[in-house]
Image: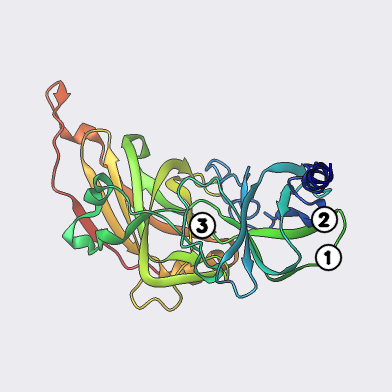
Amino acid sequence: MAGAAILTGALSVNSCHRRPLEDPDNLVVVKAVIDTKGISNVTCDIYNPEIEAPVIDPEMMRVLFYTSDGNSVSTDTYISSASYTDDGYKVLQGEVAISEGDYRVLVYNFDTESTLIRNSSEFSTVEAYTDNVNSAITKRFASKAAEIDIDKIVYEPDHLMVARNQKCNIPYHTGTYEVKLDATTVIDTYYLQIKIKGSAFISSASAVLTGLSSSNMIAANKRIEDPEAIVYFTLQPTTDPYDGEEAIACIFNTFGRIANYSNDLAVTFNINTTYGTVIQEEFPIADLFESDNGKNHHWLLLEHVIEIPDPGAQTTGGGWTPQVDDWESESYDFSL
């Protein structure tokens, strides 16, 4: 009987009871406000409404809580519940289970197509970058006259909205505790335009721009200038909204221009005609970045005119015979 009593007591001490999987006193609500105000060519400084501006509307954010020294990840999760502030800014939020203490916090949107992230195991090493373009694109710009290092040609990045806090203290609390952060872009957006004669004969147009940053260390918002990046983008026929002249133009993204670039920044246009020829022209545009339009609005407006020959000049008899000539490369000095 005594043995039975002892056994009963042991079962009573070790019997199962219900406990929450997460202690509610360790729950933190993270809110990331998507701050898009003042982004030239996206939410302000629109030069040409015909050219579609990038849309910044993230649907998911990655949340990284690092130890106070930033050397390791304490919690890695995602937030996607959407709401809006009274000013109309989108807010993404979600719950994170984490103990009280000091942390470094990094939040960024996780739904970009071109912008990639690497080295996220430490706070200071998280880097946003883009991949090199495919070989079909590099072949378009392989002209010796253009003097382009085709191995450095990369895709333009998507806007990456980043929030950070290097000294985030989670105090002891009951219930949930809120961490609210403003997420801003690490990307610059520019409008580029050059005048055209004969835009009806263009089948496609693209360009590469030298002298740009290759990535961004997003925890410190530090742009990487070595190695340099050459960014690829496409353009479309349009008209200048102020003088009505034919042009090709685009809105493109970049991690930023390299300050005090040793060589002149240059843009190389590659235009395919409807009758099978290719026109390639290069222009230095450092002065445009330093102009009032470049600095204040991120508008790069080339006044030179590229002429697309009328295919009627190649006709014989009742029709015309398309042919592909060697690429023609012409360089011009340009100043404001």
- Closest to the camera, between mark 2 and mark 3, is 2
Amino acid type at image mark 1: Tyr
Please name whichever residue, 321 or 230, is drawn nearer the observer in this view of the structure: 230
Task: Give the image location of residue 106, x and y in percent.
Answer: 62, 62
Which numbered marker is on residue 172?
1
Which numbered marker is on residue 190?
3
Please name whichever residue, 117 or 131, is drawn nearer the observer in this view of the structure: 117
Query: In the image, what residue occupies the spot 45% across and 52% down?
Result: 193
Residue 313 higher or lower than 54, as above or below: above
Tell me the residue that label 2 is attached to.
25
Residue 31 higher or lower than 275, as above or below: below
Amino acid type at image mark 3: Tyr
Quarter of image, res 297: bottom right
User: Nearer the N terminus, badge 2 or badge 3?
Assistant: 2
Q: Which color scheme did the rendering employ for the protein?
A: rainbow
Tell which residue pokes out farthest to the front in this image. Answer: 1
Q: Secondary structure at mark 2?
A: helix
| Residues at marks 1 and 2, CA–CA distance in whole angstroms | 8 Å
User: Nearer the N terminus, badge 1 or badge 2?
Assistant: 2
Query: In the image, what residue occupies the spot 56% across and 45% down?
Result: 53
| Residues at marks 3 and 1, CA–CA distance in whole angstroms | 46 Å
Query: In the image, what residue occupies the spot 15% across and 20% down?
Result: 318
Disc 1 vs disc 2: Cβ atoms closer than 8 Å? Answer: yes
Amino acid type at image mark 2: Asp
Please name whichever residue, 296 or 242, is drawn nearer the observer in this view of the structure: 296
Task: Give the image location of residue 20, x and y in percent.
Answer: 78, 45
Task: Give the image location of residue 102, x and y in percent.
Answer: 71, 71
